[in-house]
Image (cartoon, helix red, strand yellow):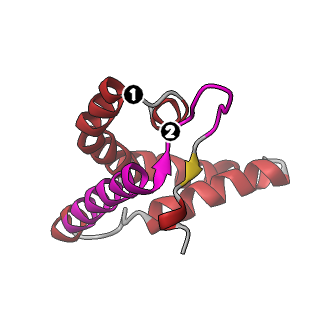
């Protein structure tokens, strides 16, 4: 949805995108903090790690790192705080795009940054 909003910006799409931001942010954070999913990756690393190709091991290791960086091991209160910070960050990024990015126009398929935001 973010990509579509960036390349085919319109009032209706922007409105729908902004309405979905809290849901998308919460989903991504919940997925990244999923303890059952993290345990599944850890089980694969522990039980199958030696048999995996180096690239496969790296994928598993990076996924586990991403879970840790997203706060999978945090207590419930800290996870909720992390989630609220991620939502705020997502909303600020969207606001920045609305303020600083000019939508594509006929003859120009990509967005560009407004000169007033370049500094």
Where does label 1 land, which residue? 10
Count neighbours of disc 2 (C-alpha within 10 A) and say few if under 14, some if 14 to 19, many if 20 or more: many
Q: Quadrant of residue 85?
A: bottom left
Q: Residue at x 55, y 68 (%)?
A: 118
- Image-based side of 63 in relation to 84, left or right: right
Where residue 97 appears, x then y in whole percent? 43, 52
Q: Nearer the viewer, residue 53 or 72?
A: 72
Task: State yes or no: residue 111 in magenta.
Answer: no
Mark number displayed over residue 58 = none
Q: Indicate the secondary structure of the residue bearing disc 2.
A: loop
Question: The magenta stretch spans which residues?
Answer: 81-110
Q: Which residue is drawn at 29% across and 42% down?
A: 21
Task: State yes or no: residue 91 in magenta.
Answer: yes
Q: Which residue is drawn at 60% across and 48% down?
A: 44
Residue sticking out furthest to the left: 77
Mark number displayed over residue 103 = 2
Dots 1, 2 in contact, CB < 8 A: yes
| Majority secondary structure of magenta residues | helix
């Amino acid at each position: 949805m973010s990509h579509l909003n960036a390349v085919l910006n319109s009032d209706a799409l922007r409105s729908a995108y902004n309405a979905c931001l809290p849901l998308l942010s919460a989903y991504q954070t919940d997925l990244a903090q999923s303890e059952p999913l993290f345990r599944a990756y850890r089980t694969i690393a522990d039980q199958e790690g030696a048999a995996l190709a180096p690239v496969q091991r790296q994928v598993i290791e990076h996924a586990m790192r991403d879970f840790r960086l997203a706060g999978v091991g945090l207590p419930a209160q800290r996870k909720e705080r992390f989630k609220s910070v991620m939502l705020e960050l997502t909303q600020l990024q969207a606001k920045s795009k609305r303020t600083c990015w000019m939508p594509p126009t006929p003859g120009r398929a990509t967005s560009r940054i407004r000169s007033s935001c370049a500094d």
